[in-house]
Structures are given as structure tokens and as C-alpha cells.
Image (cartoon, rainbow, N blue to C red):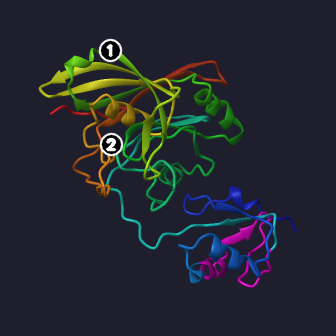
Amino acid sequence: MSKPPLPKFATRDGVSPSCVGLPAGDWPTITDFLVQRFPAIARDVWLDRMQHGLVVDELGEAVTPERKYQGHLRVYYYRALPTEPRIPFEATVLFQDAHLVVADKPHFLPVTPSGHYLQETLLVRLKNQLGLDSLVPIHRIDRETAGLVLFSVNPAERDAYQALFRQRDVTKHYEAIAPWREDLGFPLTRKSRIVQGEPFFRQAEAPGEPNSETHVSVLQVSGQQARYALSPVSGKKHQLRVHMLGLGIPILNDRIYPPVVPTPEDDYAQPLQLLAKSIAFTDPLTGQARKYESRLRLLLA
């Protein structure tokens, strides 16, 4: 009898399994290792997953509660969240063919599963909606940011598309609403060194050789606010939010730039005023010029 496909290719309700490598060690059982490796997950949770066949090794063999520990083995498991509140906003598919899916992501919806989000993510929603288990994002935008996200349909083609972003062969334009500062002299270019800040999920500008660059211009001014066009040259985490803060014009409704302790909870009535507006590139497979534009809009007060 032939083996089933490797578990990394299987999905359940649009969710792919997570993977953990087992290092050399003397844990009595794989269960003991998992409990120690993931202290936030109770032993009873692992036992329940195993009972339902949701923990397997790299060959597709079930991991049972008493299975002896074996180093240098990969274990796949399906995450489950006891409660996951519905994010009350929907994405729109703007384009789909045999190679790409282009979606307009709403504010507050994560692109991929992580932390407290599993089903309530753009990737899982699209997998279930389109019936495409192989779908993978080519790039990411922040959960708080709205706008364009591109997905690869064919696993064999993913690297060709992802290479466009690694090599900066993609033209991306964002829009943001922020305070108006006539004294800054637009258009301008912000270059700085962005490093991990405190706590870990915040980034910060630091002295040293710049590793990030953003072009900033003004599209519209209304009273004390303005609509800005932001064109990132690099792709550092939270780059646009950090650069706008560094210019003294933090993006409207940003919960973490400038830093506030504790970080405020989501307020659906006040989304971050940052939008991934357009994206353009030459298709690496067909040579076709591709350009997509978000249908979403940010409104000045």
C-alpha cells in the first residue's frame, strides 16, 4: 500500500500543518518534548490532537502519546484555537488566473496564521473560498494595513515571483493619512537604520548605516491632515510606519507608533490609515507587464 502524501502538503479547513524539528535529546517520549517545547500548550491539548490524528511525523506516521522520542525527525501538527472571534471585514479578489491571485485585504485581517489568528486570516479564507490548497502569499503586509496582497497558485512558480520582491523588481505605492507639515519640504526621501525595538514587535530607528529608504510626497491637503504617497525602496518590517513617525507625522490611528504602553486593543472604528494602493512588475514567466490597484480608499477628515 502506498503512503499518503507528506503531511506538509495536506490542509484542514484551509490550514496547513505547522512543523517542528526534534533535536538530539533524551526526552522519554515525543509528547514530553512537545510539552516542554510549547509551554503554553497543555499536555491534554497534545493528547487530544493525537487522539484525532492531528500529529504525525515526516513520513505521515501517527505520533501517539507513548511514542518514544527520536531526534532529527520532523513532526507536523495542526493548530486549533478554542475561540477565534470573527473579523467583520471581507477581502475582495481583484484578479485570478492559473499563476496569481490578487486580493484587496481589509484592515485588521492578518495575511497568514499566527498567534491568535488561524481561520480569521486572508490566506485561509482564500483557500476555502477558491478551493486552492496550494495558495501561498508572495509577500506580506501588516495586519493593520489594508490593500493589495499577491498569492502564487502553482508551487513550482513561487520562487520566480518571490524573487521579484527579494531583488526589488517590484514597484509598490502606498497611501497614508497623517498630520500635515508644510515645513518638511515635500517630496522627500527618508533613509534610516531600522532595528528591532522594545518590545519585540516594535521596530525603531537607530544610528548607523541606513538599511531602509522611503520616498514621500503629498497628494492632498485638508486642514491639519494630508494624504501622502509612500513608495518604499526597501522592505523592512513596519518601515512606512517607522519612517512617518521619524518625520514627526505618525500615520493616523497607528496604535504602536508612537509607542503606547500597554498597546491599545483593536478599534474597528479607527483603522490604521495606511493602504497598499498599487503594485507593478514584469511577470517573470510570461514577460507581461502587470499592474494592480486597490479599490479601497482612505478618506481625509
Q: In this rendered view, identify the residue nearer to me: 163 or 189.
A: 189
Q: Residue at x 21, y 33 (%)?
A: 299
Residue 161, position in %: x, y?
62, 31
Q: Quadrant of residue 71?
A: bottom right
- When the figure is inspected, residue 8 is found, relative to residue 83, above or below; the finding is above
Q: Amino acid at mark 2?
A: Tyr
Q: In this rendered view, identify the residue nearer to me: 31 or 1.
A: 31
- 7 left or right of 275? right
In the rendered view of the protein, which quadrant contains the C terminus? top left
Q: Which dot marks residue 187?
A: 1
- When the figure is inspected, residue 292 is found, relative to residue 113, above or below; the finding is above
For the question of whether residue 293 can be seen, the reply is no
Residue 60, position in %: x, y?
77, 67
Residue 57, position in %: x, y?
76, 67
Q: Residue at x 61, y 58 (%)?
A: 16
Determine which residue is flagged by label 2: 257
Which residues are drawn in magenta?
A: 46-69
Q: In this rendered view, identify the residue nearer to me: 257 or 102.
A: 257
Q: Amino acid at mark 1?
A: Pro
